Image (spheres, helix red, strand yellow):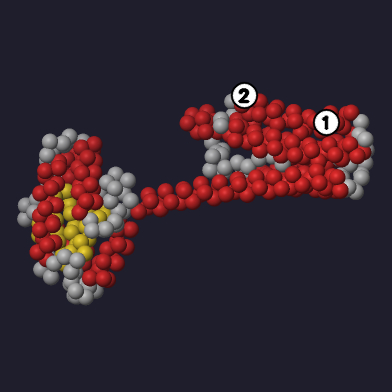
Amino acid sequence: MDQHIDAATVTHTPVAARPRGQRRISRLPQRIYPFRVLGMGLAGVAAAVVLYERQAAWPAWTWMLVIALAWPQLAWLRSRRSSDPHRTEVGNLLVDSALAGSLAALLHFNLLPSVLVLTLATIDKISTGLPRLWLRSLPWMLGGLLATGLATGFAAAPETSMAVIVACLPMMILHTIGVALASQDLVQQIRGKNRQLDQLSRIDGLTGVTSRRHWQQQAATVFAEARGNGRAALLMIDIDRFKDINDHVGHAAGDEILRALGEILLQLQDRPGLAGRYGGDEFALVVPGVDRAAATALAERLRATVVVRTAGGPGPEATISIGLAMVDPAHASLRDWLEAADAALYRAKGAGRNRVEASAG
């Protein structure tokens, strides 16, 4: 009967409190308008056939035309001119239900169009996603029915002719298609949001490397694959004196260093997900399919590249310390591998920083 609202667009926050939100909400009437015009117009087609068969007087025709044609335009103007379009549009939705009840009584409760109008009006409230709106609309629907029923003496002519059935078909068909399309659009939006959330959970927003939890999943896979042959390395990387950089030069310079290190690691990783941000200024890189010599050479190249990349930047020339550990049969789990690399990193920092230290295993 009326319209379908993307629940993600609607907010209950007062308009004055969120100017940017208000700009989004102010577009809501424009989204609703075509659905209301279509729903009320199709209901008017079925109602016109009923009124014609009954040879209704002009007041009944006038009220039907107000509901089917004038009300959608009035609702549009009310919302567009309102200082709180969301609240006004919720009020319009309640009026829609009142008019649906009124139309059923106006039709003398002709069975098929009356049931369709009342049912579809309720479904539309459910489709908005607004909590309990359909329950709030029921008293309005009953009120419209009673008010018009009193005016018509509660006249009842429930028989539905073939002509009225045919006139109701567009309302049934097009409304169903509209609900399906609106639902499909909402599902697509939800899927898009879920993909964004999944991406946010996997990727560190500042550096572009994998977040810690997802990186650990990737590292565990490499660990399981390489445990038998020992051809995989784990590099634990720490930016030297990073706190001093933030304190003396500023967090903006520190962020640039983090981004630069993230870009370098992304270029070095063998496949997506093997470079991760393990902590604030601590990173990790899993390198599958390498022996100790190749892993050490890669770690030294990484260390030297960071110095070159950060030289002449907004902050000081940055250095990194790296702890390297090869997969070892003695490692019972990923945690053992991490601890070996972390111990090597601790030795690198203790030995003066800006260096690579490898575990004994």
The nearer-to-camera label among 2 and 1 is: 1
Q: Position of residue 94 (x, y in %)?
A: 71, 38
Residue at the image point whose x is 12% and y is 39% from the top: 311
Q: Secondary structure at mark 1?
A: helix
In the drawing, what numbered circle is on residue 353? none
Mark pair 2, 1: CA separation = 25 Å
The residue at the far left in this view is 351
What is the three-letter code of the residue carrying label 1?
A: Trp
Residue at the image point whose x is 63% and y is 42% from the top: 4
> Can residue 89 be spotted in the picture?
no
Q: Earlier in the sequence, mark 2 or mark 1?
A: 1
Looking at the image, is 92 positioned above or below residue 192?
above
In the drawing, what numbered circle is on residue 63? 1
What is the three-letter code of the residue carrying label 2?
A: Arg
Q: Quadrant of the N terminus?
A: top right
Q: Left or right? Give the position of 307 relative to 164.
A: left
Q: Secondary structure at mark 2?
A: helix
